[in-house]
Image: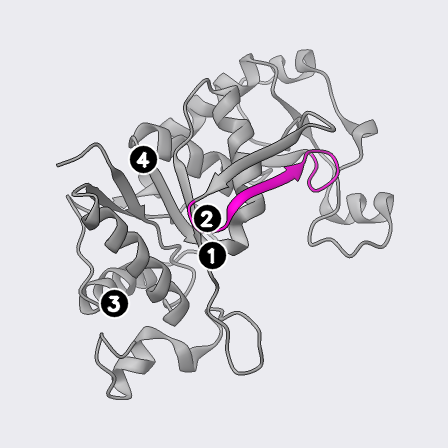
Amino acid sequence: MSNYCGRLAPTPTGLLHAGHAATFRVAHARARAASGCLLLRIEDIDPDRCRPEFSVAAIEDLRWLGLDWDGDPIFQSARREVFLGTWRRLRDGGFIYPSPQSRREIAQAVGPSDEEEAIFPTAWRQSPEAALAWDAPVGTNWRFRVPDGEAIAFDDGRRGRVKFVAGRDFGDFVVWRRDDVPAYELAVVADDIAMNITEVVRGEDLLLSTARQLLLYRALNAPPPAFYHCPLVCGPDGRRLAKRDAATGIRALREAGLRPADV
């Protein structure tokens, strides 16, 4: 096998749909074409939204689609110590700080915005010394301090050169939630480092997340993987598919008589 290592990373908050099938098919094809390894990582880190039955369904649906992987499925819910260790490294390095403000408070401070997520006010940043007073992350949100004005650029395997500006396109972002759950950005980066992932294949709705995650890789002194962002699959109304669109679910399509190749 080559040094290539990729991953399939479904989040079990609902049933997988045709958009997931399209992205996972690309991830599978790229790993196998590289004679590399492909892991299945169930990203069930959020206990309030993730359900065991959706994890079981995701594994069954991927197998029905003819997608295989190497080794046993990996569950993020069993990897809390890895995420806590990453939080400690970021705290000790002065990269994160406690942030008690709620989304509503941020929205009220920033005012109306067309952005999906309001830019966190820099006046609310806390010092690295404030972070060191905390032995554990529970009880408040934790944010990563971005380098304002710095261009974060990367070469995407499909899109080419992509660039975002920290402080303009995105602000200080949450890495740990007040309900004691690691945020997506931290969990994904921590696991991709630990699992030696060399290429991340996912939907292009996560391009901005890649810019944030590149800052985490740098803070953790870890080389980032390559990235390949797939086009999103949209329905007849032009909106990208979501798990609430039951008719496009892999299970619904299977029950309608479609074969894996049709999907």
- Which of discs 2 and 4 lies nearer the camera? The answer is 4
Q: Residue furthest bottom?
A: 256
Where is residue 99 drawn, in percent x and y? Answer: 69, 31
Disc on the earlier residue, 3 or 4 = 3
Residue found at x 48% / y 26%: 217
Q: Residue 214, position in %: x, y?
A: 52, 31
Query: Dot 4 corresponds to which residue?
Result: 197
Secondary structure found at label 2: loop
Q: Is residue 102 above or below residue 121?
A: below
Give the labeled residue for mark 3: 61
Distance CA(mark 2)–CA(mark 4): 22 Å
Q: Is residue 84 left or right of residue 239?
A: left
Q: Are marks 4 and 1 in contact (CB under 8 Å)?
A: no
Q: CA distance from mark 4 to mark 1?
A: 26 Å
**Magenta stretch prevailing secondary structure:** loop
The residue at which mark 1 appears reads as 49
> Residue 46: which disc?
2
Can residue 142 be seen here? The reply is: no
Q: Residues within 10 Å of mark 3 (few under 14, many from 20)?
A: many
First in sequence, mark 4 or 1: give its number.
Answer: 1
Q: Which residues are magenta?
A: 157-171
Mark 2 or mark 3: whose residue is earlier in sequence: 2
Q: Determine whether 240 is above or below 191 in the image.
A: below
Tell me the kind of residue under disc 1. Arg
Of circles 2 and 3, which is in front? 3
Mark 1 and mark 2 residues within 8 Å of each other at the beta carbon: yes
What's the distance in space between the residues labelled 3 and 1, CA to CA? Answer: 20 Å
Toward the left, the furthest residue is 1
